[in-house]
Each structure stands twice: as C-alpha cells, then as structure tokens.
Amino acid sequence: MNWDDARIFLGVARAGGLTVASRQLRLDPATLGRRVVRLEADLGAALFVKGPQGYRLTQEGVRLFDHAERAESALAAAESELQGALSGAVRIGAPEGCATYLLPAVTARMAEAHPGLEIEIVALPRVFDLNRREVDMAVSVSRPTTGRITVQKIADYGLSLAAHREYLAAHPVADAEGLPGHRVVGYVPDMIFDRELDYLGEIGVDRVDLASSSVVVQAQWIARGRGIGVIHDFMLGHLPGVERVLPHRIALTRAFWLLRPAGDVRAARLDAFAEDLVAGLRTEIRGADTRS
C-alpha cells in the first residue's frame, strides 16, 4: 500500500462519497472509484459499504482509517519540521460577517509574512463538518459541546441595533417599545442555523420585513436606509452613515470560537497558523471597537 492510495482512501472516507472527494482531491469520481476498488482488491478487504447515501466505512475500513490518519500525521509533522516556516494550503470556514469584514485583512498579512501559504476562505451561513475535512479549521459563533473537536475562544465582539442616519431622520426611534413600528431587517427566521444569531428575538422583535440568510445583504439594506436591524460593531466602520440606535439600551455580545478536528494530523503546522489567525482576529476586533 503506497501513500497515494492512503491519501485517496482518507479523502473518500472523510467526504463520505466520490463526488465531494473528487473536488477536494482534484480527481474525477470515476478515477476515485477505480482506485478504491483496486485498493480493496490489493488488501483483500471491503473498506466501504457503497449505497445511495454515499460511502460508509466497514469495520475493516475504520481500522485502516485510524492507521492512515497516523501515517498522515507523521508525514505532516516531518514536513513541518523540515520547512520551518508556515506553508501549504489551509482552508478556513467562517460565517459571512467574519469572512467579509475580518478575515481578509488578517489572512492578507499572514500571506505576506509567509509566501508559501495558500489560504482559502469558505464563507457560508452554516455549520462546517470538520471531521469530514470540509475545512481545516472553522470560526464559529457558538461553542460546540459534542464531537471530536478542539475549541479555542477567539474573542468577544459586540452587536448593535443600527440604521442609516437618513432613515432615522425620517423615522426617529424614541425607545425600544416603538421598534415594532419600524421596517425591520434581519435573518430569514427558519434559516437561522445557530441560536446565537437570533438577535431580534433577544431584543423582543418578532417580525422581519426585509429578511436574508446573508448578513452582508442585511448590512446593505441598512446602509441604503431601507430599515433598522442588528449588525456587528466591527462592520460599522465599513458602512458610512450607519449609526447605532439606542446604544445605552440595546447592546449585544457574542463570541467567536476557533474549531479544529481533535488530533489534527498537521497539528504542528496548523498550531502555528491558528495562533497567528487568532491573534490577528483579536487585533482586528479591538481595532474596530476603537474606531466605532
């Protein structure tokens, strides 16, 4: 069994099927299927149960998976030790607000300091499956309590009720009790993928007039004077004319968490990357708080 066979086996096992694995490994599904069949024949064991729902590991496959991960870990540790500097591809999953307004500045500085780095940011409003290696690490708005995941707190950040000054000139906000009379911007209620994103419910607003699963779309509605809504404080400096509303009455706090698969196979290299990433995000959040 050679390392390339092990790499393909790990990719298919983590993806749970050929289609997703083909995108991650950059090989077409038919080739992956043939490689899996050949590996099973060479080992004399069925590694996967193939069905409409994808590829599921057999007992033999689970045993091989553990050995293959340890081999991957050893190779990655050797690479990290020999190279010294941060290098290689790292994929980060993050919610849109963080991915749009914080990560570009942080990762640009990291890429400049470490020319061998290849950084990918996946900005999607959902929970990432770290155990299937959808991403190498993820920024989350809540702390998981289950799964084989290591968790590190990045920083607290604030959120405020906000609107454009032109909207406020036409629709003054005297107190929180008057909010139901305003055009409210927020998430599509049944698409809130994390309870920490239910900002409006926390301040007693139960109706959304302009709704989007994208926090960036929400911010643009607010910036165009179309309504009032809750946005991250670190976004305020990017939205000219947008002001906090009732700042002494309505101020929310959330936290970002960095999530990684437990026992990550590239721990040494990704530890250093994660350390730089967390430090950079903390700096950006503090700087945004000062500017706003």
Image (cartoon, grey):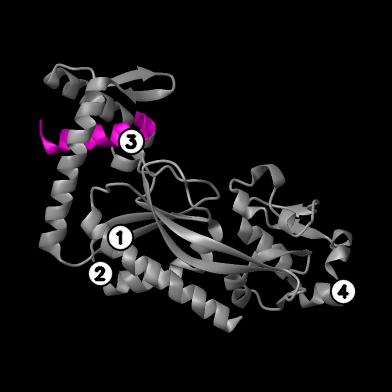
Q: Nearer the viewer, mark 1 or mark 4?
A: 4
Instruction: Judge whether residue 88 can be spotted in this image.
Output: no
Q: Nearer the viewer, mark 1 or mark 3?
A: 3
- The picture places residue 160, in percent across and down from the top left corner, at 68, 69
Label 4 environment density (alpha carbons within 10 Å; few <14, some 14–19, many ≥20): few
Q: Quadrant of the C terminus?
A: bottom right
C-alpha gap between disc 4 and disc 2: 51 Å
- The picture places residue 94, in percent across and down from the top left corner, at 47, 56
- From what the image shows, is residue 267 above or below residue 277? above
Query: Dot 4 corresponds to which residue?
Result: 172
Quadrant in the picture for residue 185: bottom right
- The picture places residue 278, in percent across and down from the top left corner, at 39, 67
Find the magenta span and give its range.
1-19
Is there a contact, CB below 8 Å, between mark 1 and mark 4?
no
Any magenta on residue 115? no
Is there a contact, CB below 8 Å, between mark 4 and mark 3?
no
C-alpha gap between disc 2 and disc 1: 8 Å
Judge from the rendering whether residue 124 lies leftward or rightward of residue 187; answer left or right.
Answer: left
Q: Earlier in the sequence, mark 3 or mark 2?
A: 3
Is there a contact, CB below 8 Å, between mark 3 and mark 2?
no
Query: Dot 2 corresponds to which residue?
Result: 115
Q: Amino acid at mark 1?
A: Glu
Tell me the tag on residue 14. Answer: 3
Q: Secondary structure at mark 2?
A: loop
Q: How many marks?
A: 4
Q: Which SS type dominates the magenta stretch?
A: helix
C-alpha gap between disc 1 and disc 3: 21 Å
Q: Amino acid at mark 4?
A: Pro
Is there a contact, CB below 8 Å, between mark 1 and mark 3?
no
- From what the image shows, is residue 289 above or below residue 225? below
